[in-house]
Structures are given as C-alpha cells and as structure tokens.
Image (tube, helix red, strand yellow):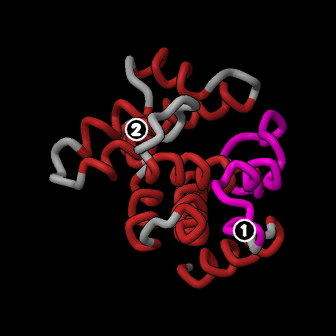
Amino acid sequence: LAACWRNTLAGAIAADLIAPSFRQDPGVAYTAGLLRDIGRLALLVKYPEAYANAIDIAREGADLRETERSLFDLDHCQAGQWIVSRMFLPEQIALCVVHHHDSRLPGEWELVHLVRTADRLADALGFSILPASSLPPAAEILAEIPGASRRATLDPDALAAEIERRIAALN
C-alpha cells in the first residue's frame, strides 16, 4: 500500500509541476493525477493479498493490467471508471482515470495527455511500484511535452528532488 500511495502522490505532484508546460491549471492537474489510480487503491484495499500477488507477478515481468484483469476480471482503470462515475467529477478528470495508460489519445484530451506524461514520468524518476527497466528515460518522456520553450526548464533531477521533497512534507 505504501508503494502505491507513494506512486500516486508522485504522479499527482509531477502533474502539478508540468501543468504549465501543457497550459493546464496545476490544481486540476494535481487532482487528476491524484485520482488517476483510484481503481488500483480500491483493488488494493478490497483485496490486499490478491493485489499484492498481482504486483509480485508483474514484478516478474507480466503486464500489471493484464494480471489485474486475470485476477479480478477488470483492471485498475476499469475499477477507477466505476468509482469516478459515482463521484460527479468533471468529465475531463474521469477521462484521466480511465485513459491515463492509453498511448493513442485524441488531441483535444490535453489533461489526459498531461496525466499520462506525469504517470510515466513518476515511474521513470524512480517512484514506480514496478521495476522501471522497460520505461524510457525521464528526459525522453519530458521531450514529449509540447513546445520546446515550455519544457526547457524541466530538469529530471530537479523534478525528482521536488517530488521527493513534497512527498516527505506530507509524511
């Protein structure tokens, strides 16, 4: 649970930090980043032993979402969709929960693009619940942010340090 919560916080903080580069509101980005894995936390709370098993299986190389579907008949994005559909959240945030792992997104889904980038960035910066060996380096993920001048100030080491500082301040 601690590793999942740390990853959730890291993704939310990363979303907040990169929001200006996407010309998005940092508060909305933080909220969307915080809620992106609400389905994972729900599965972990409801089925702690089974979800710990899913993470162990994924650590051995299996795809986590496929493992979730195998064990629970749904993945954490689908579980999150069920939860957020009952929360009366703005559609933009609900889309982030459902689609933050999708590699092909409509261009107008800028907040989803931001949260997907923040999710991958948090993992690449060392906040992943799984080994990050299959992830591109953080600098490569940052290069996907639109506008060279907007991303020029984003340094992976500085982002990792700020994320770590803000997580520590919450503990």
The answer to whether the residue labelled 1 contacts the one labelled 2, judged by CB atoms less than 8 Å apart, is no
Q: Residues within 10 Å of mark 2 (few under 14, many from 20)?
A: many
Residue at screen point 78% across, 42% down = 132
Image spot of residue 120 (x, y percent): 65, 47
Mark 2 residue type: Leu
Which is more toward the observer, 17 or 123?
Answer: 17
Image spot of residue 33 (x, y percent): 47, 58
Mark 1 residue type: Ser
Q: Which mark is residue 149?
A: 1
Q: How many marks?
A: 2
Q: Which mark is residue 37?
A: none
Residue at mark 2 = 43
Is residue 65 visible in the rendered image? The answer is: yes
Give yes or no for residue 113 being in the magenta stretch: no
- In the figure, 171 relative to 40: above or below? below
Residue at screen point 20% across, 42% down = 85
Mark 2 secondary-structure assignment: helix
Which is more toward the observer, 118 or 45?
Answer: 118
Is residue 160 visible in the rendered image? The answer is: no
Q: Residue furthest bottom?
A: 169
Mark 1 secondary-structure assignment: helix
Q: Which residues are magenta?
A: 125-152
